[in-house]
């Protein structure tokens, strides 16, 4: 049965903006993205919103719904009490372009800073042999749909623009962990550079990223903490410390 | 106004699997490459591919090889495929998958540590390399990261990571430009600002994907608006066999907001069965004559096949997609469907909850989150959804060069010919890789000999005027309502079952919308304005719909993704005919063209009695073209 929903939408651009209240029809089973599209088609033709697959697979329609980072295509209207106003605003950690669309280019710049996968030079196509159990750890991180909700919620950069330069964010910590755990990757020192160049040390494990991940990737427990532990081991292990002083070590 | 201008060797329109694979090929050959994506980088529709990528690596069953794969592909396409494309695809697919692994892809493994392969409709052996049910994501992420790796290499060599490949994200191309009859570049606008951009390049690769958004119920994302099909038509290229659309048999049907979202064929590959509301496993009734040898006609044998594939025939749930879609359609029409117009697909009886969550994680998630259904305990409700267009730009198979337009190439879903009248599941991802690479190679060869071909100021002025036009018009209709109207027409009149009279009426109605769309006006400014963006998408979809309806009315038979209620059977004479759509500036014209005949060495791969079901006695007597 159709009913009316009060939707409060942030409208504006990089200069200014405000919340705008609209009333919109909502039907059984609809998600927040459906009602935003209805507003677009019937009331505000130029309302800007990013989306692609509408099935939780592409990670485009990231926004904040009642202040929480979420995918609009996977958020049922019925999950909020009937009669309650739903407020949709753009991701807070990134600069607004227009309405619900933000400039997420920060993430693509960071992606270019992470050293690429490095297989052994003599690995011929078709020759790789890996056990399922060995690829599974990296496969968990490769489920990432790059919605950047983890980046948005992370308090290191959410309200601290100044930290962005030295902090890659949870999305790229799992990328580094994925490569570090890849059975065939031969690049050394991934954990060390995560710490020293990509800001792993700035994370203080509040697990907010894990909570918002729509793919339920255990970002903190399975990527960040294991990398931090290894870094600590090596940094403070006296034998290793000594070893690193007496002869050149190849890395971690 | 000064316009942003760029100069490249190759311009690639589309950043899905085919576009990115073409980019890698062209860059590795030393060319400077621009990649245009309509969305953000890495969001292309390729991410939606679930089941896997078909390649006869023979990791699970070593009887498999390219010849078996070629035969399956031709059968699936009802022999309307361009044989050379199907041959190249079957031969090169394994190398393309192995290459992805060298670039960092992590496919699921066999116990020997090789890439695991799963069963799929129409494939004789387990053939689909996969990662759970998110294979497309793995493919696009691997390609995306390969592009970044190439950029890092360029950065080390030149100090500028974007010196060799630059990704232009959220940019729409509105015109492909030609001078002296050859490609000179393309024109478009940034979605974010509405500012216009000119690209000058001697070669353009179109890799824009499909047309699903022309239809009301579709598994495609908003980007599937047939941009490349329309751009190619307007640039003087042809489209081949646009009547063939694949309705994937299993889309979600309830609740309405998710209608059309794909339910992967892997559900059936892993043992899911289709039943109607009387509890009948109905697919046994719908095994066509040509497939009777390969498919089980009773439940016992079908069930045994999951354990012993050498001594039993396959379950009919794994027939090619067109057959299953038509069967579901018939069951629903006969009143044996659910109240929401679907049938049941159940995997909970055969597999344990743990195995389902492991092998079909995103399906479990999708149904649980969006429909409140736990597929480890209950059946899913499914029905056909517009999924894929077999028709597309007519190309030279070996180079992916668009016929008739020097400098233009097309690969992936936007190209036609490879899949004939019906695509097998899993053949799309490898199609992207095989022909994406070949389009890249084709462009490299072409650019070597192509001189400079600068864009004229007249062409720029005309392209700019077109972008400004909707803002200068007042009081016209809005693009959203016209789009909705078009979708109703295609859904009702050009859909899964067609008749001559309905198609005629569709052609008239599409022409009417086309006329009205010339007056579309847009509210708001140029900055990230979806109403403005849709105005251009709409124009593209109208050309696609016109090509489809006009090709469909001409083909008086039923074959693959084209079913005529007034011409129910397959007719061997029609198998020799391709429909070629071209654009004269005001309307689409469709003509017949003879389909190239199989050469003897490929003809001989088949049992002649099987070919008799598809070919005329004269063709059989010739025994191949050479």
Image (cartoon, rainbow, N blue to C red):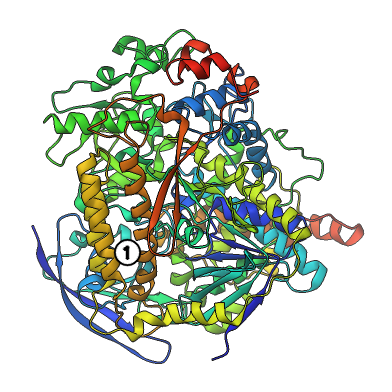
B168 lies left or right of B209: right
Secondary structure under the numbered disc 1 in the rendered image: helix
- Quadrant placement of the N terminus of chain B: bottom right
On screen, B317 above or below B440?
Answer: above
Residue B77 found in image quarter:
top left
In this view, the residue in front, A179 or B572, is B572
Considering every residue shown, the one lying at the far right of the view is: A246
Eyeballing the image, is B218 above or below A241? above
Asked if residue A139 is positioned above or below residue B158 in the image, the reply reads above
Query: Is A25 positioned to the left or the right of A208 in the image?
Result: left
Q: Quadrant of residue A65?
A: bottom left
In the image, residue B594 sits, relative to residue A40, either above or below, namely: above
For the point 34% across and 48% down, the residue is B550
Q: Where's residue B179, x and y in %?
A: 63, 70
Judging depth in this view, the residue of A75 and B251 nearest the camera is B251
Q: Position of residue B222 (x, y in %)?
A: 37, 60
**Residue A216 location in percent, x, y?**
42, 52
* Chain designation of label 1: A
Q: Residue furthest top?
A: B311
Task: Tell me if residue B371 can be seen.
Answer: no
Q: Residues within 10 Å of mark 1 (few under 14, many from 20)?
A: many
Question: Which residue matches tag 1?
Answer: A72
Q: Position of residue B477 (x, y in %)?
A: 23, 74
Q: Is residue A57 visible?
A: yes
Quarter of the picture containing the C terminus of chain B is: top right
> What residue lies at 52% left-to-right and 21% top-to-bottom?
B125
| Number of marks present in the image shown | 1
Seen from the viewer's position, the closer of residues A192 and B345 is: B345
């Amino acid at each position: 049965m159709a009913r009316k929903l009060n939707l409060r939408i942030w409208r504006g651009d990089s200069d200014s903006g405000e919340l705008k209240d609209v009333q919109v029809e909502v039907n059984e089973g609809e998600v927040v993205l459906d009602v935003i599209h209805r507003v677009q088609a019937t009331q505000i033709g130029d309302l800007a919103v990013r989306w692609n697959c509408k099935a939780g697979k592409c990670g485009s329609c990231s926004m904040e719904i009642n202040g929480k980072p979420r995918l609009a295509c996977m958020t049922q209207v019925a999950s909020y009490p009937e009669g309650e106003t739903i407020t949709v605003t753009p991701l807070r950690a990134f600069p607004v372009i227009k309405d619900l669309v933000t400039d997420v280019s920060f993430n693509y710049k960071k992606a270019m800073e992470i050293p690429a996968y490095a297989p052994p030079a003599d690995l011929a196509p078709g020759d790789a042999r890996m056990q399922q159990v060995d690829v599974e750890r990296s496969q968990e991180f490769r489920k990432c749909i790059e919605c950047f909700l983890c980046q948005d919620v992370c308090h290191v950069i959410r309200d601290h623009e100044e930290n962005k330069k030295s902090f890659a964010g949870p999305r790229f910590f799992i990328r580094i962990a994925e490569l570090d755990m890849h059975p065939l990757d031969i690049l050394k020192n991934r954990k060390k550079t995560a710490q020293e160049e990509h800001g792993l040390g700035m994370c203080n494990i509040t697990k907010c990223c894990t909570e918002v991940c729509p793919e339920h990737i255990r970002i903190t427990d399975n990527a960040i903490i294991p990398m931090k532990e290894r870094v600590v081991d090596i940094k403070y292990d006296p034998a290793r410390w000594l070893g690193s002083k007496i002869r050149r070590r190849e890395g971690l | 106004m000064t316009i942003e201008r760029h100069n490249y060797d190759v311009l690639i329109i589309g950043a899905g699997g085919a576009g990115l694979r073409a980019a890698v090929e062209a860059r590795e050959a030393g060319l400077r490459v621009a990649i245009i994506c309509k969305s953000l980088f890495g969001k292309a529709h390729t991410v939606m591919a679930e089941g896997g990528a078909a390649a006869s690596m023979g990791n699970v069953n070593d009887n498999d090889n390219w010849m078996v794969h070629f035969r399956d592909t031709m059968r699936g396409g009802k022999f309307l495929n361009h044989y050379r494309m199907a041959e190249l695809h079957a031969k090169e697919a394994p190398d393309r998958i192995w290459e992805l692994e060298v670039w960092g892809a992590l496919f699921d493994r066999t116990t020997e540590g090789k890439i695991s392969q799963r069963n799929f409709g129409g494939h004789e052996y387990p053939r689909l390399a996969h990662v759970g049910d998110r294979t497309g994501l793995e493919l696009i992420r691997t390609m995306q990261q390969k592009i970044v790796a190439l950029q890092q290499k360029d950065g080390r060599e030149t100090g500028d990571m974007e010196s060799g490949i630059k990704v232009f994200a959220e940019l729409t191309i509105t015109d492909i430009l030609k001078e002296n009859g050859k490609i000179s570049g393309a024109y478009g606008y940034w979605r974010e600002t509405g500012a216009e951009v000119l690209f000058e390049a001697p070669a353009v690769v179109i890799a824009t994907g499909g047309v699903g958004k022309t239809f009301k119920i579709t598994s495609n994302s908003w980007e599937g608006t047939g941009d490349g099909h329309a751009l190619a038509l307007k640039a003087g290229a042809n489209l081949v066999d646009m009547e063939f659309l694949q309705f994937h048999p299993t889309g979600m049907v309830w609740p309405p907001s998710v209608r059309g979202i794909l339910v992967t064929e892997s559900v059936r590959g892993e043992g899911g069965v289709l039943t109607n509301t009387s509890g009948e496993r109905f697919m046994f009734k719908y095994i066509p004559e040509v497939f009777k040898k390969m498919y089980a006609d009773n439940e016992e044998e079908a069930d045994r096949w999951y354990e012993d594939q050498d001594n039993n025939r396959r379950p009919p749930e794994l027939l090619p997609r067109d057959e299953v879609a038509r069967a579901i359609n018939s069951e629903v029409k006969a009143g044996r469907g659910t109240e929401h117009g679907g049938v049941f697909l159940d995997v909970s009886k055969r597999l344990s909850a743990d195995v389902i969550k492991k092998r079909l994680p995103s399906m479990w998630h999708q149904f649980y989150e969006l429909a409140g259904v736990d597929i480890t305990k209950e059946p899913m409700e499914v029905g056909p959804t517009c999924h894929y267009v077999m028709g597309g730009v007519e190309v030279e198979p070996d180079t992916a060069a668009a016929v008739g337009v020097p400098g233009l190439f097309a690969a992936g879903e936007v190209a036609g010919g490879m899949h004939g009248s019906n695509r097998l599941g899993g053949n799309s991802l490898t199609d992207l890789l095989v022909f994406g690479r070949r389009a890249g190679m084709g462009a490299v060869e072409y650019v070597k000999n192509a001189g400079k071909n600068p864009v004229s100021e007249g062409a720029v002025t005309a392209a700019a005027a077109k972008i400004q036009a909707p803002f200068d018009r007042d009081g016209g209709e809005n693009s959203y309502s016209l789009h909705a109207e078009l979708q109703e027409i295609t859904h009702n009149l050009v859909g899964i079952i067609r008749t001559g009279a309905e198609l005629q009426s569709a052609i008239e109605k599409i022409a009417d919308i086309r006329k009205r769309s010339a007056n579309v006006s847009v509210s708001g400014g140029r900055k990230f304005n979806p109403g403005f963006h849709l105005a251009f998408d709409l124009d593209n979809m109208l050309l696609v719909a016109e090509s489809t309806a006009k090709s469909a009315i001409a083909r008086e038979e039923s074959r693959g993704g084209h079913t005529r209620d007034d011409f129910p059977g397959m007719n061997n004479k029609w198998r020799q005919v391709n429909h070629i759509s071209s654009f004269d500036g005001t309307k689409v014209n469709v003509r017949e063209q003879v389909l190239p005949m199989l050469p003897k060495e490929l003809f001989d791969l088949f049992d002649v009695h099987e070919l008799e079901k598809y070919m005329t006695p004269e063709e059989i007597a010739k025994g191949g073209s050479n």
